[in-house]
Image (cartoon, rainbow, N blue to C red):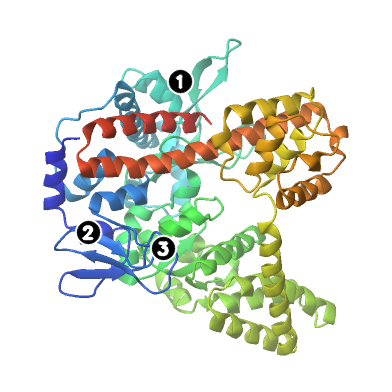
């Protein structure tokens, strides 16, 4: 991307507006804005944006840079991709694209095709929804109270009961590579390892498009119309693709984000129909997890817009469990969380249809603090007033109390729990004190252990006899790639054991007392004597462990290259920029193959 275009974009964009899409900023001076830093955890805002000079700086973690650096860090993209993203946000037309290599051009073309193929599929499904075959789909949606306006707003469609029609219609317009990578088609692998003929993955289903934050369709949720075994699961999501990772996406974020900022809270529901019904009834700041477990990445995504959340999941057991896990993730990140439990055990969609939006708004206003909800849940799960039931209720609540970062909030939660469960508050305080001590001891002991099971697997393999296939595999690969383990807690042990024959006593190979103790603990923790391990199973475990180390190293180098690319661009060093970009493209491809 030409330097003069990047400078033009930088001069024209409002850095406060661009960063404001990711961080809630407040004016803190004539030209300064501040907020919570998105690059490290903090409770008091130390992140500053200067509108005049166009830079950001965090006084806590010392991250700094211009608008492009910020987008590169937030979206994990290269400098050229950041320039294009900022230009698109500002409505600045892009110049004719130039690529540093054929590989970069091919990858950019594939990604663009995947966006286009999802748009084409959305239009295909929308058109099919009006066909005679879709009569049952229309009846189903009418029965759910979905209006024509809602269908159009959320671009709901229908996948016909046909293996080939959509493939044949899209084939003239998209490459086979893009069609196979889209997740819209299935195929059976051939004997020679090549992909067989493609056929439609989604058939005889109502189609709900999933959009990214910019409103581009990147995946689908498909609802079956039949309930027999042949029809497959009731709900089916697109598989993971270069565009779509389900744990990184929140349904309706593109439509909800402005209202989330304005109202400073988000309503989190479980299903897409819940989200759609509530949104169309007038509550615009609503998001859905799309039937997947709430993830840390989704929490981080949500924190860019607000730290206040109302959770309204289905009241069944699965919904209650999902609500508890979501509460845990959110409170750990210092969100203010409230919970709605609707009367009659209804989900949000049905409640709005049966009782109206005003009643639902009243329910939202009456949302309970998450601590009150969890205490009530503990009393429902263990209703007896016996000592045994009280202990079980206490054990249910303790992990939630411990997760709260704020000590005052923890103490308040504990006091409420003790009072409502009929437990001596001093007993509960002692439990929390012991739990904190155990956690510190656990942290201390873990610091002396290998960082992961990956290292344990390799250490166990390296003390096997010289001719054992698992030992041969582990030693050969580690000798070839010392960079894979150089910064690991067990690094010195892995190096020593892979470069020399194992002595009769494996502990004699350890280079120092600390690593000797580490190896002793690893061998003690093994489920069976190392010499009795299943050879085939051990080889498989070693392959998995080596794969993990290789991926970890690639990801670390990928992060380093982003910084190097940004630095080369700032210096105007075109040679190094080309070299680093080419290396990053190779690593990006390697990671996709892992």
Q: Residues within 10 Å of mark 3 (few under 14, many from 20)?
A: many
Say whether disc 3 or disc 1 marks the residue closer to the N-terminus.
Answer: 1
Q: Position of residue 149 (x, y in %)?
A: 31, 51
Name the image quarter holding the N terminus. Answer: top left
Q: Position of residue 281 (x, y in %)?
A: 37, 63
Q: Is residue 183 left or right of residue 212?
A: right
* Label at residue 55: 2
Q: Residues within 10 Å of mark 2 (few under 14, many from 20)?
A: some
Residue name at image x 84 percent, y 77 percent: 388
Relative height, residue 361 to residue 149 (above, below): below
Tell me the SS state at disc 2.
Answer: strand
Which residue bears the numbered disc 3?
303
Q: Mark 3 near mark 1, Cβ–Cβ under 8 Å? A: no
Q: Is residue 505 left or right of residue 293?
A: right
Which residue bears the numbered disc 1?
164
As measured in the structure, the alpha-carbon distance from the residue carrying label 2 to the one carrying label 1 is 52 Å
Q: Position of residue 491 (x, y in %)?
A: 63, 43
Q: Mark 2 near mark 3, Cβ–Cβ under 8 Å? A: no
Which of discs 2 and 3 lies nearer the camera? The answer is 2
Relative height, residue 225 to residue 133 (above, below): below
Count of residue discs: 3
């Amino acid at each position: 991307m030409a330097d003069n275009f990047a400078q033009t974009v930088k001069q024209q964009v409002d850095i406060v507006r661009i960063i404001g899409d990711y961080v809630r900023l407040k004016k803190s001076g004539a030209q300064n804005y501040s907020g919570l830093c998105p690059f490290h955890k903090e409770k008091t805002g130390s992140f500053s944006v200067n509108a005049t000079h166009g830079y950001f700086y965090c006084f806590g973690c010392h991250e700094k840079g211009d608008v492009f650096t910020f987008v590169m860090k937030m979206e994990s993209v290269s400098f050229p991709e950041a320039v294009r993203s900022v230009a698109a946000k500002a409505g600045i037309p892009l110049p004719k694209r130039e690529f540093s290599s054929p590989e970069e051009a091919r990858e950019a073309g594939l990604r663009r095709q995947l966006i286009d193929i999802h748009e084409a599929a959305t239009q295909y499904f929308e058109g099919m929804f009006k066909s005679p075959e879709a009569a049952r789909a229309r009846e189903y949606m009418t029965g759910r109270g979905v209006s024509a306006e809602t269908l159009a707003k959320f671009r709901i469609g229908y996948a016909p009961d046909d293996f080939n029609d959509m493939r044949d219609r899209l084939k003239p317009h998209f490459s086979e590579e893009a069609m196979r990578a889209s997740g819209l088609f299935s195929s059976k692998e051939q004997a020679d390892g090549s992909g067989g003929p493609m056929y439609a993955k989604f058939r005889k289903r109502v189609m709900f498009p999933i959009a990214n934050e910019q409103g581009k369709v990147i995946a689908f949720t498909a609802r079956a119309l039949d309930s027999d075994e042949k029809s497959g699961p009731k709900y089916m999501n697109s598989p993971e693709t270069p565009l779509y990772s389900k744990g990184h996406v929140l349904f309706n974020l593109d439509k909800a984000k402005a209202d989330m900022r304005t109202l400073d809270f988000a309503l989190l529901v479980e299903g897409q129909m819940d989200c759609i019904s509530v949104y169309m009834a007038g509550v615009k700041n609503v998001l859905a997890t799309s039937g997947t477990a709430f993830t840390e990445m989704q929490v981080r995504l949500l924190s860019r817009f607000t730290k206040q959340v109302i959770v309204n999941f289905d009241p069944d057991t699965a919904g209650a469990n999902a609500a508890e896990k979501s509460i845990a993730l959110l409170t750990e990140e210092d969100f203010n969380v409230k919970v709605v439990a609707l009367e009659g055990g209804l989900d949000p969609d049905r409640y709005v249809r049966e009782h109206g939006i005003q009643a639902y708004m009243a329910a939202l206003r009456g949302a309970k603090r998450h601590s009150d909800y969890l205490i009530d849940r503990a009393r429902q799960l263990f209703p007896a007033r016996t000592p045994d039931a009280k202990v079980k209720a206490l054990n249910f609540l303790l992990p939630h109390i411990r997760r709260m970062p704020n000590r005052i909030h923890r103490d308040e939660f504990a006091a409420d729990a003790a009072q409502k469960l009929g437990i001596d508050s001093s007993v509960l305080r002692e439990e929390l004190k012991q739990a904190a001590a155990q956690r510190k001891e656990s942290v201390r002991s873990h610091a002396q252990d290998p960082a992961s099971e990956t290292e344990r697997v390799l250490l166990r393999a390296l003390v096997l006899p010289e001719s054992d296939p698992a030992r041969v595999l582990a030693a050969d690969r580690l000798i070839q790639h010392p960079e894979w383990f150089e910064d690991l807690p067990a690094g010195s042990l892995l190096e020593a054991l892979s470069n020399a024959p194992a002595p009769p006593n494996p502990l004699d190979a350890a280079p120092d007392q600390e690593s000797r103790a580490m190896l002793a603990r690893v061998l003690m923790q093994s489920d069976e004597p190392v010499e009795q391990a299943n050879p085939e199973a051990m080889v498989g475990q070693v392959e998995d462990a080596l794969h993990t180390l290789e991926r970890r190293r690639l990801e670390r180098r990928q992060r380093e290259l982003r910084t190097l690319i940004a630095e080369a661009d700032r210096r105007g060093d075109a040679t190094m920029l080309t070299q680093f970009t080419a290396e990053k493209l190779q690593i990006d491809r390697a990671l996709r193959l892992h």
